[in-house]
Image (cartoon, rainbow, N blue to C red):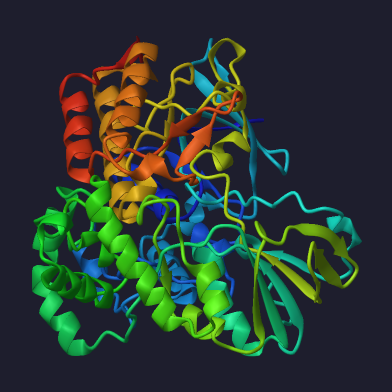
């Protein structure tokens, strides 16, 4: 017999925990389902060596409860995975959320029942649920991608993905081959290089990578920040990227070389988000961007001693910031080690995986362990992984095959009473995602509360509103330099066309739009049914 509830939330990361907490506070009968054995989401699964956030810890945290904010003490400017996981476990315990979650269980199927105006949900243990609202808090970066490696089945040793790490696999003293130098790969290289006999790094596209400038947080600093937090949070909500520190006014191309060099140096020294905030036009003006890109390239040449490694690690062909700007804490130091080899697979393609080696067009590299830091099916993979059937038999995977679409990143036409937290068409991965998550959760809770108050049973994004929003998202993105890079920010249609997924118009502007839609009776959505 199916269990019945007002809402079912899929996921127990930042989004899922807050969503369940918020709906319970609003008096809804809500439950959560999570594939992991405990809370954490991204930070439960990504346990690879060196994993840490690239947004300052005090910003990459909840703001909905001042007492929670006051009682938790972050130890570092950029917290590592174990500390973030402890934080989310603390949140679960503090708000007594565990009884509302079913862990170690994966949602496999969800089907809209037109007659009952309910979702029928099935999990991998055979359990069935019938709920009015299905809320997908599944994460934008949670479904790992593996490359198409020739004869991978030949390999005799362990094969790991950074997002599905097995901590029992020993790396010390072994030959490790790691694929990918995106954010996860760069972080993993820093630590694996310290223990591996040889670490061979296979890279397709070098990334602009900025030293994090990580350091412990002193009691004095935290005491100084505490009274400023409310103001800083409010300003971040109204900002473009949701960070405490926004872009500085002015244009790089308008400054004289000496002034520009000093400003870019100060931004580089500021850490992760610094370089892109040195000037306000770096993501919209190619000439200004080129100054920042050249500055970063020169820094890489200074930091990497081997000229050939430095050449391979120096990005060209796309603007700085148009692909995710990565953070490093020891990556360049690792590249200077004698036991680290760097292979550019564009110059030296992988031809064969052997039992204990990787053979390229030019050489054979010993391998006891393979590590894939090859990213995710970004923004949409975790949703498409569930067999979701909406109105008139529509399948979400099929509907998104020609590019992901959602109205405001919240609702999908043809799928009533289904919400996506930080879905396509929202700021999500191009913002402080915790801030964006809170905004989505608050909006969804408001929507469900208004529906309850008005006796409405269903809500569904309208096709014309959805189409207009995705066109607007595309138009705004193409006013910037983001589409000039081949990045995971862009989804692909079946015929190869690119669809820019995140909304780059700014967190503040996006929040105003969502609030306006709600104030106008959920304009662009169709509401129906009387309880």
- Number of disc labels: 0
Asked if residue 312 lies left or right of residue 201, the reply is: left
Quadrant location of the N terminus in the rendered image: top right
Q: Residue at x 16, y 35 (%)?
A: 512
Q: Nearer the viewer, residue 513 or 264?
A: 264
Task: In this rendered view, identify the residue nearer to me: 286 or 4.
Answer: 286
Asked if residue 313 can be seen in this view, the reply is yes
The quadrant the C terminus occupies is top left
Q: Which residue is pictured at 72% across the width and 72% down the height? A: 177
Q: Position of residue 493 (x, y in %)?
A: 56, 27
Q: Is residue 124 left or right of residue 76?
A: right
Residue 235, image x, y percentages? 12, 55
Quadrant for residue 355, please give it: bottom right
Q: Position of residue 264 (x, y in %)?
A: 21, 70
Residue 79 in sight: no
Position of 305 relative to 515 (above/below): below
In the picture shown, does residue 505 fall above or below 415?
Answer: below
For the point 41% across and 53% down, the residue is 17
Q: Looking at the image, is 216 positioned above or below residue 108? A: below
Residue nearest the observer in this picture, 107 or 406? 406
Q: Where residue 445 sits: x, y (%)?
A: 30, 37
Q: Residue at x 63, y 38 (%)?
A: 385
């Amino acid at each position: 017999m199916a269990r019945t509830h007002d809402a079912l939330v899929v996921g127990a990361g930042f989004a899922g925990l807050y969503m369940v907490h918020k709906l319970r506070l609003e008096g809804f009968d809500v439950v959560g389902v999570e594939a992991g054995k405990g809370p954490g989401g991204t930070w439960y699964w990504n346990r690879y060596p060196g994993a840490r956030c690239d947004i300052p810890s005090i910003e990459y945290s909840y703001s909905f409860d001042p007492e929670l904010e006051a009682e938790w003490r972050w130890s570092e400017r950029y917290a590592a995975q174990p500390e973030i996981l402890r934080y989310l476990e603390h949140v679960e315990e503090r708000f007594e959320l565990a009884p509302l979650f079913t862990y170690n269980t994966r949602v496999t199927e969800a089907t809209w029942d037109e007659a009952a105006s309910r979702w029928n949900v099935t999990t991998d243990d055979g359990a069935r649920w019938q709920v009015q609202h299905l809320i997908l808090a599944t994460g934008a970066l949670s479904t790992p991608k593996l490359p198409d490696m020739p004869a991978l089945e030949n390999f005799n040793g362990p094969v790991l993905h950074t997002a599905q790490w097995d901590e029992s696999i020993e790396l010390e003293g072994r030959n490790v081959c790691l694929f990918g130098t995106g954010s996860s790969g760069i972080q993993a290289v820093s630590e694996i290089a310290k223990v591996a006999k040889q670490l061979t790094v296979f890279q397709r596209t070098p990334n602009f990578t900025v030293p994090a400038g990580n350091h412990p947080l002193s009691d004095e600093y935290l005491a100084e920040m505490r009274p400023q937090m409310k103001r800083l949070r409010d300003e971040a909500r109204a900002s473009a990227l949701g960070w405490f520190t926004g872009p500085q006014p002015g244009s790089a191309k308008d400054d004289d070389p000496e002034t520009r060099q000093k400003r870019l140096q100060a931004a580089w020294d500021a850490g992760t988000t610094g370089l892109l905030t040195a000037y306000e036009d770096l993501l919209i003006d190619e000439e200004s961007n080129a100054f920042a890109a050249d500055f970063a390239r020169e820094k890489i040449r200074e930091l990497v001693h081997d000229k050939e490694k430095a050449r391979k690690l120096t990005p060209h062909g796309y603007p700085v910031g148009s692909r995710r700007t990565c953070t490093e804490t020891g990556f360049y130091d690792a590249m200077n080690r004698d036991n680290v080899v760097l292979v550019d697979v564009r110059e030296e393609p992988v031809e064969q995986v052997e039992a204990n080696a990787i053979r390229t067009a030019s050489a054979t590299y010993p391998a006891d362990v393979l590590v894939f830091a090859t990213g995710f099916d970004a923004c949409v993979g975790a949703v498409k992984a569930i067999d979701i059937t909406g109105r008139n038999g529509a399948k979400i995977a099929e509907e998104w095959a020609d590019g992901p679409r959602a109205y405001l990143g919240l609702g999908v036409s043809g799928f009533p009473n289904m919400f996506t937290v930080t879905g396509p068409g929202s700021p999500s991965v191009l913002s402080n995602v915790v801030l964006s998550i809170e905004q989505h959760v608050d909006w969804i809770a408001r929507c469900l509360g208004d529906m309850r108050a008005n006796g409405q049973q269903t809500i569904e994004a309208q096709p014309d509103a959805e189409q207009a929003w995705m066109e607007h998202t595309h138009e705004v993105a193409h006013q910037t330099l983001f589409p000039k890079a081949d990045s995971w920010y862009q989804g692909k249609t079946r015929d190869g066309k690119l669809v820019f997924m995140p909304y780059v118009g700014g967190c503040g502007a996006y929040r105003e739009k969502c609030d306006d839609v709600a104030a106008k009776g959920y304009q662009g959505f169709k509401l129906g049914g009387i309880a």
